[in-house]
Amino acid sequence: MLLQVVLFVLFVPCVAAVCTFPSQLQGQWGSKFDGWTDLTITSGQITGMQPDGRSLDYSCYQSNGTTYVIVSAEFSFGNIQFHFYTCLDIVPSQASDVLYFRVLTHPNIGHQNFSVMSYAQDGDRNISEICKESSTEVPLHFDVFLKKGFENNIETDRCPRSLHAEFTANFTNDVDFSKCPEGFVIDGCNNRSHLTFNYSDCSGDQSSNGAPMYMCLTSMEAENTTYTTIYLPSAEGAPVNAYEIACMEQTMVDGQLSITKSGGACGAMPSVEMMANETVSCRMEVPETTTTGTNTSTQAPPSGTTKPGGGGQGGGGSGDVNDGNAASAIVYGCTTLLIAVVCGVLASALP
């Protein structure tokens, strides 16, 4: 413990980047949430953060997996020199065009979404104190950043199976409900990576007329609930009060799927905008397959005729191929037996 404190005190006056950010994190990023400015991430620095209203460059100081401790450039307060430190959990999407960003530091200085710990050059705090919260990947407290220039061309994730259906939904606030008292339909079948909110049945003066199509960005699970972050890339045809980022929270209650949609990031505790219940499941998709045996190529049966477990008994391909192999084995066995019998008869006839 003492060694860590001594090293911390010695190295603070000349803080430099001692770790690097991977290429998936590098670039210019914009957030859809209040409290964040655009960020630029290079191999060793993050610029654009303003935890106390001032803009400082932050260097990568220490990393472990997706967790990064960053340190600010030196600044003065009175006659004392300080550095800000904070701990971030930064998780890139598979396509590296979306970042999920979470602050793991309890602040002694905080500004909206961001929080830091300040250390004077002669401070003696243990650097491990900077990462206060668990780095477990949960959907709560993550903010979403989109790569600049790709906001309308984000690579989507497949929506979770629980959203592959059609749902009837109703607004939960009185104002929107009065404009759409019969509810509306959410279609998760037409495109398995998008959700279409069809407001066409709402009255003509409903600000939510149209059919905005949200992308599924990512899904995470916590306990018995699935949280899906959805994104509306273009406001064209969308309701005037649409959230660009929203959360679809899916929970099984007494064997029934209950869904709520809230504006903002999952876990941000916004007010619930709507509630929905499943009405129609999507038609099952049966892909065409080709099974190849010895000198045999057979197309899979038409949709609806494939046997459970992969088609044939034991799940070993289509039934036709297995039946052909069995017939070949019977013919081979009978031929062998016939040859043996003939040979036996001939042998007994010899003197």
Image: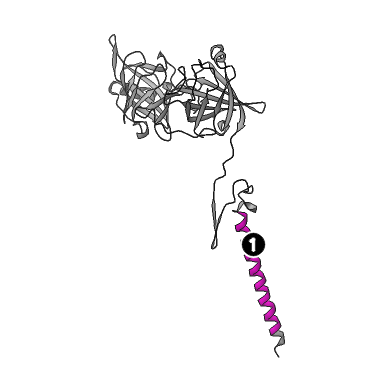
Q: Which residues are magenta?
A: 318-346
**Residue 3 appearing in the image:** no
Q: Residue 70: within the magenta?
A: no
Residue 97 horizontal side relative to residue 266, left or right: left
> In front: 108, or 112?
112
Identify the secondary structure beneath mark 1. helix
Q: Position of residue 181 (x, y in %)?
A: 59, 16
Rendered location of residue 163, percent (x, y) = 56, 31
Badge 1 amino acid = Ala
In the rendered image, residue 303, in percent from the top left (x then y), is placed at 59, 46
Establish if 287 lies above or below 189. below
Q: Residue at x 53, y 15 (%)?
A: 271
| Image coordinates for residue 90, horizontal then vertical, percent | 41, 28
Residue pictured at 54% horizontal, 45% vertical:
287
**Relative height, residue 128 to residue 82 (above, below):** below
Camera-side residue: 219 or 311?
A: 311
Q: Is residue 321 magenta?
A: yes
Q: From this viewpoint, which residue is outermost toward the front?
A: 204
Q: In the figure, residue 60 lies in which quadrant?
A: top left
Which quadrant does the C terminus fall into?
A: bottom right
Q: Would you name the residue on which mark 1 appears? A: 326
Main SS of the magenta part reads helix
Badge 1 crowding class, 10 Å Cα cut-off, few under 14, some 14 to 19, many 20 or more, is few
Can residue 160 be spotted in the picture?
yes
Residue 78 sits in quarter: top left
Residue at the bottom extreme, as displayed: 351
